[in-house]
Amino acid sequence: MTEQRKRYLRRRRRYTVCIQIGRVLLLVAALALWEIAARLSLVDPFIVSSPSRVVATLATLYTSGDLWLHLGTSCLETVIGFVLGTLLGTAVAVCLWWSETLSRLLDPYLVVLGALPKTALGPIFIVWIGAGTASIVAMALAISVVVTIMNMHVGFLSTDKQKIRLMRSFGATRGQILRFLVFPANYDTLFNTFRVNVGLSWVGVIMGEFLVSKAGLGYLIVYGSQVFNMDLVMATVLLLAIAAVVMYQGILWLERLFKKQLGVMG
Amino acid sequence: MMITLRQVALTYQSPHGETEALRDITFSVEEGEFVSVVGPSGCGKSTLLSVIAGLETPCGGTVTVGGETVDGPSATIGFMPQRDGLFEWRSIWNNVTLGLQVRRLTDDEHFAHVRQLLARYDLADFADKRPSELSGGMRQRCALIRTLATDPYILLLDEPFSALDYQTRLSVSADIHDIIRREHKTALLVTHDIAEAISLSDRIVVLSQRPAVVRSVHCLDELRGIPPLERRDTAVFHTVFNTVWKELNAVD
């Protein structure tokens, strides 16, 4: 290794470490400022809470066992909504790719559904399928399904025409073209859709829980704000942020695993 | 097995209007012959190959392969698309056996044939690699082996070298040419590169601008037996090149 390269690497490493330290400092400073402001009554801790109160609330939630109940409920609903929305959306996208007539027929309705704020459908779901988990999952599904249909359909349609020509020259059926070419060519589209859908499913679940639930993070937030327990609201938002990030990272991990598997299988 | 086209015509219909791609195409390719079709860009050369491959139905005229009228994709014809068209998510082995998998010919006998082809053309060690790990020339050979795997009598090549840089293109086209000769295939190459057509073929069919008609046919009997790269130094090469160049640029 040349002297110049060593110097470059050293500088690079130092820079990375500085950034890491900076990030931690930023967080610590914000928390400290928040804590001090609350302690000195510069802000009303009753309204803005404080880090120590948030931690205390989390500890109470943990010891009472409520933490896992609410966290688990929301996570489960999100996962179910995500899986259903993605599966259903992809299935519909396949149908649209398969039949141009169907795609032409449904096009304006998909545009309307895409533009419509799906949260407006919440009360309808509650009336139709009851005030419970099913409605919350339906919300998560409704939000992610339309995006999935549109993303996947566009991806399918953009498959290399030359490759489709090649498949047809082998006498491939439409099903074979889908299985051998169109679907695998869109693995990246699929994983991008996954990433978007995790976030959207959370939106649906929290929205749904605001409306109907008796458990879950959305329920805790609404309940906390109604009884003016801002410690509980802040603690729950923190939990939600962690859960959402963990799930997002989970998808990234799945993607890496899948790509590695693909590399092995060929 | 020979290809015969008689007064083939094809007009595309679309909401924006009619596009007459092919007007009157008549020529034939003898068994074991290497024929190139040259024409200006967008003159319908690719369409012509699609018609012969049975991917498009002509509006008029007839196409026969081995005496039978073409009415859909058939195993007698192997198609090599523009660029190499390798599937990046599949290993080289799964790329070259794609046609066999589609046709459900995944038995030992067919696989042994593919293994033989890979070994003969120096790709045996790359069977487990991804296309992205191979050079442009190797990818091109894989694309050809993928076509040869289903053992067609006739190869249709649609500007297969157009994405390669000049250096690679010269050596790869000579390579592909040798493989096709060695495997005793009948070949029809579509290209806009006059030099490439002259250096590889027994005969050249020159098409006009759209709507395409056959403008002329050049026999290259004097060049028979001369390897592609050496052909480029001959006097005949330059004469034919100039003639075809003028024909392509002539306005009716």
Image (cartoon, helix red, strand yellow):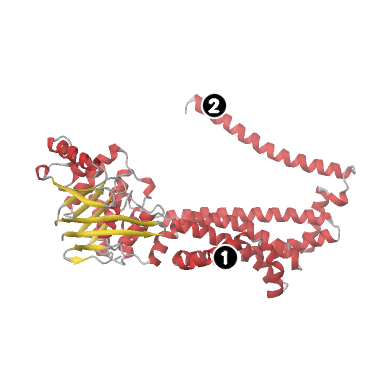
- N-terminal label among 1 and 2: 2
**Other residues around mark 1 within 10 Å, as few (<14) / some (14–19) / many (≥20):** few
- Label 1, secondary structure: give it: helix
Q: Which mark is residue B12?
A: none
Q: Which residue is denoted by mark 2 in the rendering?
A: A7
Q: Residue at x 40, y 59 (%)?
A: A181
Using the image, name the chain to which the residue with label 1 belongs: A
Among all residues in the image, which is located at the extreme front? B252
Q: Position of residue B240 (x, y in %)?
A: 16, 40
Q: Does residue A163 show up?
A: yes
Kind of residue at disc 2: Arg
**Other residues around mark 2 within 10 Å, as few (<14) / some (14–19) / many (≥20):** few
Q: Position of residue B119 (x, y in %)?
A: 25, 51
Q: Residue at x 17, y 59 (%)?
A: B4
Q: CA distance from mark 1 to mark 2?
A: 60 Å
Among all residues in the image, which is located at the extreme left? B222
Q: Which mark is residue A109?
A: 1
